Amino acid sequence: MTTTLLRGGRIHNPVEPSADCIAITDGIVSWIGPTHGVEQAGRIDETVDLDGLFVAPAFIDAHVHCTDAGLALIGLDLTGVASLSECLRLIRQFAGSHPGRVIWGHGWEETRWPERRPPSRAEVDQAVGDRPAYFSRVDVHSALVSSALTAGLDRAEAGFSPDQPLTRTSHHQARQIARSLLTPAERAAAQRAFLNQAAENGTVEVHECAYSDSAALVDLAGLLALTDPPVAIRAYLGVAVTDPAEARDWLVRTGAHALGGDLSVDGAIGSHTAALSADYSDAATRGARYLSTEVITAHLLACVRAGIQPGFHAIGDDAVSGVGEALRRAAAELGPMGTVQLAGVTPRIEHAEMPTAEAIAAFAATGTVASVQPLFDALWGGPDSLYTARLGTARAREMNPFAKLAAAGITLALGSDAPVTAADPWSAVQAAVQHRTPGFGLSPRGAFTAHTRGAHRAAGRVEGGVGTLTIGAPADLAIWQAGKLVRPEAAELAQRWSTDPRSRVPLLPDLTPGVRLPTCMATVSAGRVTFDTGLLSATRLGAKRASGAEAVR
């Protein structure tokens, strides 16, 4: 048994607001308190001087795509490209310097370009030649592809275009072909690149949202077979089921932990595929509804009866309402057990960007967790934005109502949807607080909790102090160099139940725009050092994990 004392820091802890020390024994928090009481920690084997650094619960990213996010890191990053001509220039340069079997890129967004259009297939072919190439739009619901990649596509499928980006079924088919051209080494390199980045950003777990086509299942198997991953992986498989035996079989065959994630009820706003109850403002379409309310209900019931967590991707108001109605139907069929939470499992809805009042009530009544992405609002909210262009001012103003969801008693879990947005937890927390629609944001404490304890709850974990720095909890923590630390909401809380403004108000970084966000100095996952700038290099906090599948708590 080994105990390490981290001393002289500033600890995020509501019980001991003056604590500057935390002890870790074999991967478990064993004591927290002030320096003058350190004898209560028992025998100390080693001590690390933090010199005022900030120690907080580590983050969980509740929605990622590890391979795609890694390919965006080691492939062609088109995020932030300013014009059509620049996009084509970068594609041409990348193709010339990367002779691999497939050219992979991500992140273009034509709504920000002066040309206001994406490249044509002919322009892509001119840039890459006769090589297969796949470049996903920032929302990953459409893609530019080369003609070489379309050779195996069924041109009668929904979303196929002879010269424009592919959407819907055609996009999924093209994506599957592109994935199949990756070598196992290329895939593993991409996955590790992303997981290493997540650890460097103070994250100890990611919720992988996997598809169920053949290439994606190979991808998932490779991810879960990674040896000694730096971040724990909880896998959500996007496949609909109709009976409990089928649900269990999918988990046994794939190693997935739940059936949800990107089980898509609809698409995305930017690609005009999110399912709306009225036409888009800039196109004569209401988007695409992939799953009926009946199919959603059947999936919920099958998963609940199998004791497996269900979930869905839903963005547009029609899709989100479909999930809400299915939850009500499932709860009614399950009887009294389904009125508060669906028979002991925790349903999830991913994104939920346009929830109606009725859908919010259904989520609250069934214990459904909303897995949301605050950086969507930071990128696409506000006037003169993507949301406004696609939906008009009135509907755009109502997007991503985090405060309404939280006020209804719905647990929120924050994520990035990487590579759609950066897996940058403090930026996500800041975006949740600084919502572009007044009154829709969360408090700093609420936003931080949603990216830590709330994400644990999204995985169905509520016991043992997970997501907090309390005695007996797993030592999942990150150590930060923070620009400025404050006690948010201290005055309000003091008025309610204390004359001491420090009471029960843990420290948090100042999230005011323009203030430097924290820099991660080390990340510890269940006592294991997974990222370190040299601060903890000599410590022995815990044992290593063996594989991605075994990494889930």
Image (cartoon, helix red, strand yellow):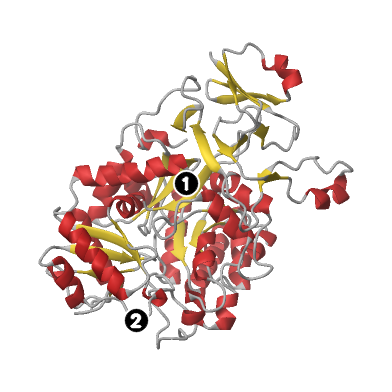
Q: Is residue 440 above or below residue 511?
A: below
Q: Earlier in the sequence, mark 2 or mark 1?
A: 2
Along the line of sight, which residue is nearer the eye, 314 or 178? 178
* Residue 447 visible to the viewer: yes
Check disc 1 and give the amino acid type: Gly
> Residue placed at 22% from the left, 59% from the top?
94
The image quadrant that residue 420 belongs to is: bottom left
The image quadrant that residue 46 belongs to is: top right
Q: Is residue 308 above or below residue 122?
A: above
| 114 lies left or right of 532 | left
- Label 1: which secondary element: loop
Q: Residue 523, how many percent across, how many down?
A: 50, 34
| 480 lies left or right of 531 | right
Task: Check disc 2: other Cα within 10 Å, few if <14, some if 14-19, many if 20+.
Answer: few
From the image, tell me which residue sits under label 1. Answer: 307
Dot label at residue 115: 2
Q: Is residue 213 above or below residue 453?
A: below
Along the line of sight, which residue is nearer the eye, 253 or 115? 115
> Residue placed at 39% from the left, 60% from the top?
263
What is the tally of numbered marks visible in this picture?
2
Q: Residue 517, how many percent across, how many down?
A: 58, 49
| 501 lies left or right of 196 | right
The single residue placed furthest to the left in the displayed view is 130
Label 2 or label 1, whichever lies nearer to me, is 2
